[in-house]
Image: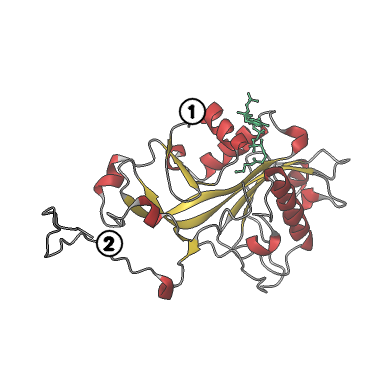
Amino acid sequence: MEFPFNINELFHNTITKLEGQSLIKGCNPNFGIVLDLIGEASRNAQNLHRPVTSANSFISSDQILYVLTDPKRNNGNGAVLGIIKTGPKKLFLLNHKGVQHEMNLSCILDFYIHESCQRMGLGKILFDHFLKVEDFDIKRLVIDRPSNKFLAFLQKHYKLHDIIPQVNNFVIFEGFFGQEELASASNQYRSSLPNRWNSMINVNAAGDSSPFRSRGNQSSISCLFDQPTKSNENNNDLWRANSVADFSKPSLQPTVFPPQPVPTSNPTKFNHHRLW
Ligand code: COA
């Protein structure tokens, strides 16, 4: 993806890490142009109604974005080849037995490689880089409604194929719940409610609508120098993240009273007690 300006001034490495918290109003406005256009391209590729990634939602957020670029393309002005974006979420996930666990997790929110270079191994390079830098255990992967391409990608490169069924839009794989996870009851909410009851509970801690904040023109990116570029040497569906109820505000925390069977005092004519 090419732009009418030199993107190598924005992205100093082949893979550059951007932190929403570090990007502030007043930073180079070309960042906003790149984020909006790459987010729009990803939206198109996934057939979503609105982009998951945009400058407005990313800047000042607690999300992290890795941007893969080729500095030599576009007559040396560079081109963006792909992105992967993560963000924190508070989720209620079910293990195999349908036991619900409340967890604060870093989720994959967006992943996109430009159409001109898909199926050439770039997605794997970007994903591997993300895993390494974030020291991310692939078994703990949580994805907000992955596309079929992404599922095929994970199956091929990381042998992730057995999905633990959830009742929300998030996908986790076999091995997600390790032993220590099951043993620790401190941060877990175990529920005897039917799965359907739990289906719409998702607390979005990402805060997608952060406005620009003014902190002057300070440098806004945290760069990775594993592959310095030349310039550096010299110097499903739209509703993915919001598809389930947002209980992030304390006042909206649901009070849950599991229904209990209570036998009636009078037996029916067949000498049965009604339970409900
Ligand atoms: N159809 C089916 N599987 C595909 C695919 C497609 N069009 N494109 C990629 N894959 C999967 C396959 O397993 C493929 O292996 P294969 O070519 O041997 O079948 C593997 O990914 C290729 O790996 P790699 O070249 O490293 O991946 P990539 O650079 O194509 O990036 C995606 C993978 C998913 C990021 C990329 O295809 C993409 O941007 N897709 C559109 C956006 C999208 O669906 N994003 C996921 C959001 S949840």
- Say how many tags the image has: 2
Q: CA distance from mark 2 to mark 1?
A: 38 Å
Percent across and percent down for residue 73 are: 83, 38
Query: Residue 88 in the image: x percent, y percent?
Result: 49, 56
Q: Is residue 202 left or right of residue 42?
A: left
Q: Quadrant of residue 276?
A: bottom left
What mark, if any, has residue 35 been given in the picture? Answer: none
Q: Position of residue 219 (x, y in %)?
A: 68, 62
Q: Secondary structure at mark 2?
A: loop
**Residue 159 location in percent, x, y?**
48, 28
Residue at point 76%, 62% (across, down): 28
Closer to the camera, 75 or 186?
A: 186
Kind of element beneath mark 1: loop
Of labels 2 and 1, earlier in sequence is: 1
User: Looking at the image, which is closer to me, 171 or 66?
Assistant: 171
Q: Is residue 157 above or below residue 193?
A: above
Judge whether 229 appears above or below 259 on screen: above
Q: Residue furthest front?
A: 269
Q: Please tell me the numbered disc located at residue 159.
A: 1
| Ligand 1 found in image quarter | top right
* Amino acid type, label 2: Pro
Tell me what residue is drawn at x 27 percent, y 61 percent: 258
Quadrant in the rendering for residue 209: bottom right
Which numbered circle lies on residue 258?
2
Closer to the camera in the image, 171 or 178:
171
